[in-house]
Amino acid sequence: MDTIEKKNLLDYLSKMQFTYRSTLNVPEDMRFGAEIEFMNKNLFDTERLIRKVINNNSDFKKLYKLSCYNRVEKRNHNLKIYEVKTPVLSNIEEDFDGLKNVCRSLESLNVIPSNEKGIHVHTDLSVLEDNTRFLETFLKIFCIYEHIIFRFSYGEENESTINMSSYSREVSHRIFNYLKRYDKFMPYREILTELRELLKCKSYAINFHQKDSSCKNETIEVRTFNSTTNPVVIQNDINLLLNMINQIVNNDIDIDLLDYRFSEYDRSFYVKEKYSDLNIEDAIEFSDLVFKKSIDKDYFLRQYIIKDKSKQKKLVI
């Protein structure tokens, strides 16, 4: 892409209306959930106010859950972290209206997105249909384009505002080494067991959660990186995971491209210090790979490239 083409793209993206959408371009029955972490801004009882909003806001539908825990900082004082967990949502207008109104309610309390935590996005592991090829493709995409996914998930920011080593550790090297010895003829469940051991630490950017007392269904979790209460950014994070998986299970991923990029993998390129760097060519290649609709590509590139927070505040929600 030459300089003129890049300038035209930047001009186009900076002028587009970055609006919250009523639904996404994925099947209606795709299920997902999100967790939003934030801090209290003022010394008065933030938790009491949040619970009051929850009780008075029908969009919370009492299924949205608020939890609070203390984190001991190095400076020897406690920092209160709050987390709102959504119920299981589907790609329908009612659920996205609820998510938007929850974000607006949080914003009305002037909460601060936590620089110690971020956003978690989950979807059902069952959508991969116990298919080893689908699972391999998902891992390859994340491995090869982790640098693009991270910068995109910084949301309004140019870089991570969190300590990624303790919250969203990069996984590209681990996945690459695993895939080099990947046995696609191994039973799916055995591969999943290996992946859970490989990514055993909860702080990795990807988790394959088991069904247990705290999790009713097996899920794929992507720990997107900067926390926010901007509903457009949260919706975009959800849209990326759902579209990526939907493209995989519909066999719409360019496997030849993935295999070529995997064969050219350069370990030195995949270090978190470089993940803030702008790489427009790779971002376009990635968006073409995982999105079918032009609007999804535009939204992805808008969030990946345009990071001016002052402009973000003027965007239509």
Image (spheres, grey):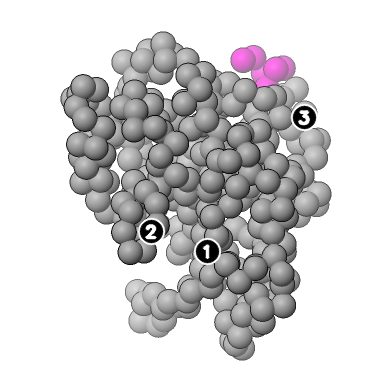
User: Position of 28 compared to 34: left or right?
Assistant: right
First to last magenta residue range: 1-6
Whether residue 204 appears in magenta in the rendering, the answer is: no
Residue 33: x %, y % from top left: 53, 53
Closer to the eye: label 3 or 2? 2
Based on the displayed image, in which of its 4 quarters is residue 73 positioned? bottom left
Label 2 vs 1, first from the N-terminus: 1
Residue to which mark 3 is pinned: 11
In this orientation, which residue lies closer to the viewer: 297 or 213?
A: 213
- The residue sitting at 57% across, 76% down in the picture is 40
Q: Is residue 134 visible?
A: yes
Residue 249: x percent and y percent? Answer: 47, 26
Location of mark 1 (residue): 85
Q: Is residue 282 visible?
A: no
Task: Give the distance between the C-alpha atoms of the residues marked 3 and 2, in whole angstroms.
Answer: 44 Å
Residue 285 in the figure: left or right of residue 131: right
Between disc 3 and disc 1, whose residue precedes?
3
Q: Is 2 covered by the magenta stretch? A: yes
Residue for point 81% across, 49% down: 316
- Which residue sits at x=80%, y=40%? 17
What residue is shown with label 2?
A: 215
Residue at image location 34% in from the left, 23% down from the top:
133
Q: Is residue 4 left or right of residue 188?
A: right
Q: How many marks?
A: 3
Q: Which of the two labelled residues, at mark 3 and mark 2, occupies the earlier sequence position?
A: 3
Q: Amino acid at mark 3?
A: Asp
